[in-house]
Amino acid sequence: MKTFTYTIKNEIGVHVRPAGQLSTAASKYISKVVITNGDKSAEATQILAVMSLGIKCGDEITVNTIGEDEERAAEGIKKFLNENF
């Protein structure tokens, strides 16, 4: 398992469009990608579950990747977040 944290910089936070983009990015990997905000967690491939985390600008999320390409998934998701959030 690979874990990292990321602070959301997008002023709007994570709403429908960014959640969809994150889901698409996460679905490129074999590994499971789990996002945690506070005491709630969701699989990144599930748009509604990600939206239910209520991620806002300034929130620090934790990302866990679990599976055979977890290192590549962690780097890819980190890059995606840096470019889009």
Image (cartoon, rainbow, N blue to C red):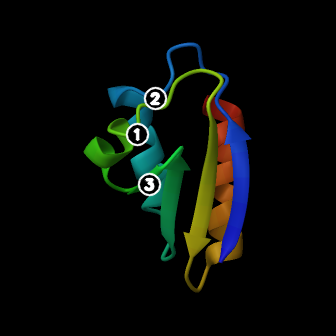
User: Where residue 69 appears, x then y in whole percent?
Assistant: 61, 79
Distance from disc 1 to disc 3, alpha carbons, whole Å, reads 7 Å
User: Where residue 22 appears, x then y in whole percent?
Assistant: 47, 44
> Which quadrant of the structure image shows residue 1?
bottom right
Rendered image: mark on residue 14: 2
Query: Helix or strand or loop: what does disc 2 sit on?
Result: loop
Mark 1 vs 3: CB contact within 8 A: yes
Rendered image: mark on residue 53: 1
User: Where residue 54 appears, x then y in whole percent?
Assistant: 41, 31
Callout 2: 10 Å neighbours few (<14), some, many (20+)? many
Amino acid carrying mark 1 in the image: Leu
Residue highlighted by disc 3: 41
The answer to whether one can see residue 79 in this image is yes
Q: Residue at x 44, y 54 (%)?
A: 41
Q: Residue at x 50, y 64 (%)?
A: 33
Callout 1: 10 Å neighbours few (<14), some, many (20+)? some
Give left or right: position of 8 versus 42.
Answer: right
Amino acid carrying mark 3 in the image: Ser
